[in-house]
Amino acid sequence: MSDTLNLLIDLIRRESVTPNDAGCQDLMAQRLSNLGFIDERLNFADTQNQWLRRGQHAPLFVFLGHTDVVPTGPLSAWDSPPFEPDIRDGKLYGRGAADMKGSIAAFMTAVERFIAKHPQHHGSIAIMLTSDEEGIATHGVVKVVEVLQQRGEKIDLCLVGEPSSSTKIGDVIRVGRRGSLNGKLTVHGMQGHVAYPELAENPIHSFAPALKALTEEVWDNGNTFFPPTRLQVSNIASGTGAENIIPGQLEAQFNLRFCTELDEATIKARTHAILDKFGFKYDLQWRLSGNPFLTSQGELIKATHAAIKSVCGYEPLDDTGGGTSDGRFVAPTGAQVLELGPVNASIHKVNEHIDLNDLATLSQIYEQILANLLA
């Protein structure tokens, strides 16, 4: 078996369900310490973060990844135990195989091969890992970036190993992501008997027309790189469970995935303006998961396109779809950021897997990107 596959098997065996790292970062340090990387742990709360850097000169190229994985779900639904890697039909099965321990294994061995060939490479190489990407992401990369900025370490180029590929390895790279803004709305009414509605105030009835207005609002029309912004309601709760009681309040949760045509302040102002039209009492709490970011051009995109063309023989599609990633914390520093990783069809599912050929190819692509930028 290849070094990349052996490393991935070792990583999957470590039950690093978020926010646990389960020794994955120790393994990275063991492999890279003899290659001139300085291992630094920047842990916050229950999150383990690792900053491995080789060199002190610009440009600083960073591989960004997360060692945590999502819970397995029902073990009985898996064809093999999720933390006992199993190879069958040319694929490796296990939790984290595609999201994103496969990428970590691929860029680790790519770095090792690149340094063996180019020990005096230009610039600097770093690897940033966190155990808090699949969770609430409050003590992970966002905190590490704050530390780096405070001491003047400037990331120039950042490749995130998120599973970006659609049907074959390297067919899609993420050059940006939409922002994500969450709202928790509480509509206040007055509880009462359903037979005496004049003595009560039904928050469900009050909110219904506002809900229609929020979901039909044209927030923007998108642009060349992003689709239009959309508001989606994820949860609504109201009532006591009794048939004869008008509830006293309603709670609703919603999310806006927004593009670069909007910003957080504008969305909040427009949302409050819509709600205020309907005259009911409410409280609204906001939580920003991340702002949109975009790397539309630059040497990182050029190097990545060239590497995929060289290794795979085709050009990738530049895309901004999907959810959020830790790239949203690095992009505001001025770094060029993109995402390139395995096929994403099985991520977060039972029987998560990665194709063995894809794993090897991904490591070759990563190595070629390094060669294109730093050799």
Image: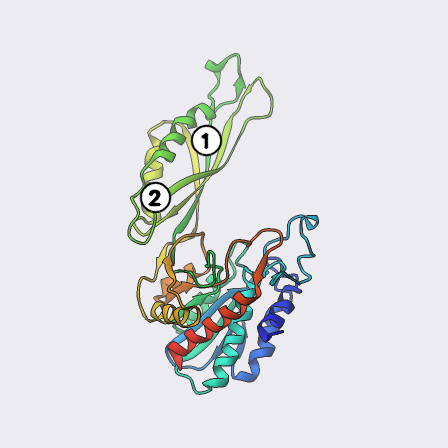
Where residue 374 sits: x, y (%)?
39, 80
User: Three-letter amino acid code at disc 1?
Assistant: Val
Quadrant of the drawing holding the N terminus: bottom right
Neighbourhood count class around disc 2 (C-alpha, 10 Å): few under 14, some 14–19, many 20 upward: some
Can residue 204 be seen here? The reply is yes
**Left or right side of 259 for 365:** right
Query: What residue appears at the point 36 percent right and 27 percent down from the top-left corner?
Result: 278
Quadrant for residue 39, please give it: bottom right
- In the image, residue 191 sits, relative to residue 31, either above or below, namely above
Q: How is the image coloured?
A: rainbow
User: Three-letter amino acid code at disc 2?
Assistant: Ile
Q: Which residue is mark 2?
A: 267
Q: Earlier in the sequence, mark 2 or mark 1?
A: 1
Q: Which residue is mark 1?
A: 187
**Left or right side of 375 for 223:** left
Judged from this view, the residue extending furthest toward the bottom is 120
Label 1 SS: strand
Where residue 58 sits: x, y (%)?
37, 79
